[in-house]
Image: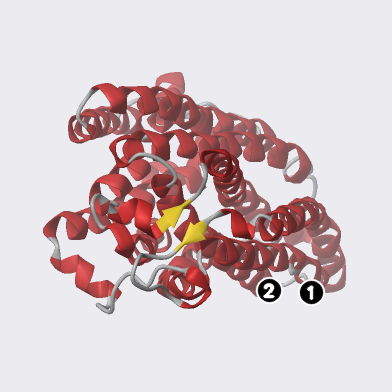
Amino acid sequence: MSDSTAVAAATPRDARHLRVFVIALFFFFGGITSLNDVVIPKLRELFTLSYGEVMLVQSAFFAAYFVISLPAAAVVRHIGYMRTAVLGLALMTAGCLLFIPASASALFATFLAALFVLAAGVTVVQVVANPLISLLGSPATAHSRLTFAQAFNSLGTTIFPYIGSLLILGSLNAVDPRTLAAQALAAYRVRETSVITRTYLGLAVLLALLAVLAWRRRQRLHEGRAGGGAPGGAPRGGTQPAWSLLRQARFGYGALCIFLYVGAEVAIGSLIVNYLMQPSVLGLTPESAGRHVSFYWGGAMVGRFISAQLLRMYSPGKVLASAAAVVLCLLFVSSHSLGELSGWSLLAVGLFNSLMFPTIFSLACEGLGPRAAQASGIICVAIVGGALVPRRPATPRIFSG
């Protein structure tokens, strides 16, 4: 029996059901992460923040990956993938509910706290989902299977910003907060942030239902290894510390690539609404620019469905290198042009970014077997690039009027 099948096994019927469940996880945590791109311009307007200040939204969100990833991997080893998924969904639900007191307080810091708790749940779910989808099938098709599942992550990132822009950005710039007195400003912030709260309350209901479903299906996955397992039937993955994986060059470089890729992806996604609003680019309204973000993430969705097939036909490393080269070319075109060419070349980056995360992840973790949960924890720590890279000063082009 291979390591992979020893770590997590299920009947063919249960494996199909579990793959659907994991795909649902990808859909929700992808969509919720992309909502930050819509929330950022809203909070920037309400709290009259600079671009540097409002990017604390992404710092608070992605800092959770740095803090939570390794503990989440340890939890997987002790209670198993499915129970840990339920824990992650419960944390995500709690984070969504925390938007209620955040809105009532009308303080930016409380929104950051709610986002951190929400992201903690997302981190736990992602630590579970990435290795689990790889384990639910043949190791030979793990690259393709993870990329296919990530396509539904992109489906979430396509749908959520579009709906979020309609719900959250519709009243942007209706009132200039700088013209309001202190009491009127507090009341305005409470009223305007209520649209954010209602959006996340709807998500809380859906996440709670998914958590209940996962708890009822927790016995469908049989975890452990011949010769002993962790409490709860979860794989121990050995006694070596997680960080020892970084001594393996292939995995170490993979973690570094995830750090840089996620940082770049988050930087683009966070600023693209404001970028498309620039008169020198597309000159769109906030709501229209928010809807255009769906083209970026929609391209990622289409690219992942295509990549899932390409990775069955060609070397994953060669496909990855080709996509990275195209991304560099598109970024060069966007930064050295004006108007529609500038805007649409940046939006097109999503199409070729699509296979980056799943392919890097599966290449880095290939052959790790029972240490898959540890590896996923390290990779998710590297996602802290989404908190650090966007905090660097942006180019004057993006912030010029």
Amino acid identity at mark 2: Thr
Along the line of sight, which residue is nearer the eye, 63 or 181? 63
Element type at mark 1: helix
**Between marks 2 and 1, how big is the CA–CA gap?**
7 Å
Along the line of sight, which residue is nearer the eye, 67 or 390? 67
**Left of 251 or right of it: where is 232?**
right
Confirm or deny contact between disc 2 and disc 1 (CB under 8 A).
Answer: yes
In the rendered image, residue 107, in percent from the top left (x then y), is placed at: 71, 72
User: Residue at 50% of width from left, 49% of height from top?
Assistant: 10
**Left of 257 or right of it: where is 59?**
right
Q: Which residue, given by chain and number where applicable, does mark 2 sit on?
A: 110
User: Residue at 29% of width from left, 52% of height from top?
Assistant: 1
Q: Earlier in the sequence, mark 2 or mark 1?
A: 1
In the rendered image, residue 216, in percent from the top left (x then y), is placed at: 71, 57
Element type at mark 2: helix
Q: Is residue 277 above or below residue 227?
A: above
In the rendered image, residue 339, in percent from the top left (x then y), is placed at: 45, 22
Q: Which residue, given by chain and number where applicable, does mark 1 sit on?
A: 105
Q: Is residue 102 above or below residue 298?
A: below
In the rendered image, residue 149, in percent from the top left (x then y), is placed at: 48, 38
